[in-house]
Amino acid sequence: MATSELKWQDISNTELTLRQSKTQEVNRLRLNHNALKLIGEKAGPKDLIFPLPSFNGSAKTIKNWATRAGIEKRITWHSARHSFATNILLLGYDIKTLSQLLGHTSIKHTQKYLSIADERKGQAVNALPDLNY
C-alpha cells in the first residue's frame, strides 16, 4: 500500500495496519509519538491520512525541497525508505527487526542494507583519534 492510500481506518490507537502491495502480506506497525504528531488529528475512517497531490506534483515538491536544502543528489520518496532502513541498522537494531519493519518476506531482501551499515561502522572506528604513547 502506498503512503498516498493510507486511510484513517488503517490506524487503531497507536498501530498502523497495512497490506504490502507486492506480497499482500499484512503488517502491523506501532506508531511512535513522532509519527502520531506528524499525522495530526484523526478524520473520518475513509479519509486519506496524507491527501497528496498527483505523483508528478509530489515529485516536483520533493525536488524543490532538495534544491532549497542544497542537495544536488536525486532524491525520491523511495529515498526515505532507504534512509529509514540505514538509520535503523546504524542505531544497532538487528536485521530481522528491520526486515519486519520494511515488510520484507525474507531477510535476503533486507541484507543489501548491511553493507551500508558496516561501512559507516568502519568510518566511526577510523574516526577515533591516534594514540600518542
Image: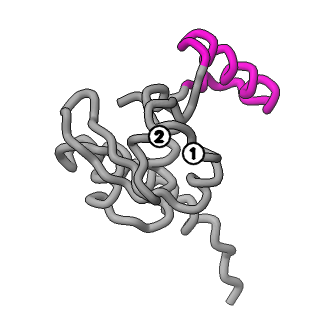
Coordinates of residue 108 in the picture (x, y in percent)? 20, 45
Percent from the top left, x then y, of residue 133?
68, 90
Q: How many marks?
A: 2
Determine if the magenta segment contains residue 127: no
Across and down, in percent, residue 24 comes to: 19, 33
The residue range painted magenta reads: 53-76
| Cβ–Cβ under 8 Å for marks 1 and 2 | yes
| Residue for badge 2 | 8
Determine the secondary structure under disc 2: helix
**Vertical arrangement, residue 73 with respect to residue 131, above or below:** above
The three-letter amino acid code for the residue at tag 2 is: Trp
Tell me the crowding category of disc 2: few under 14, some 14 to 19, or many 20 or more residues within 10 angstroms, Cα based.
some
Q: Secondary structure at mark 1?
A: loop
The alpha-carbon separation of the residues under discs 1 and 2 comes to 7 Å
Residue 25 placement, left or right of 44: left
Please state which of residues 131 and 27 is positioned toward the viewer in this rendering: 27
Residue under the point 59% across and 22% down: 52
**Image point (31%, 52%), residue name:** 28
User: Is 22 located above or below residue 110 in the figure?
Assistant: above
Quarter where residue 45 is shown? top left
> For residue 42, which numbered disc appears in the image?
1
| Residue positioned 68% across, 74% down in the render | 129
Location of residue 51 (image quadrant): top right
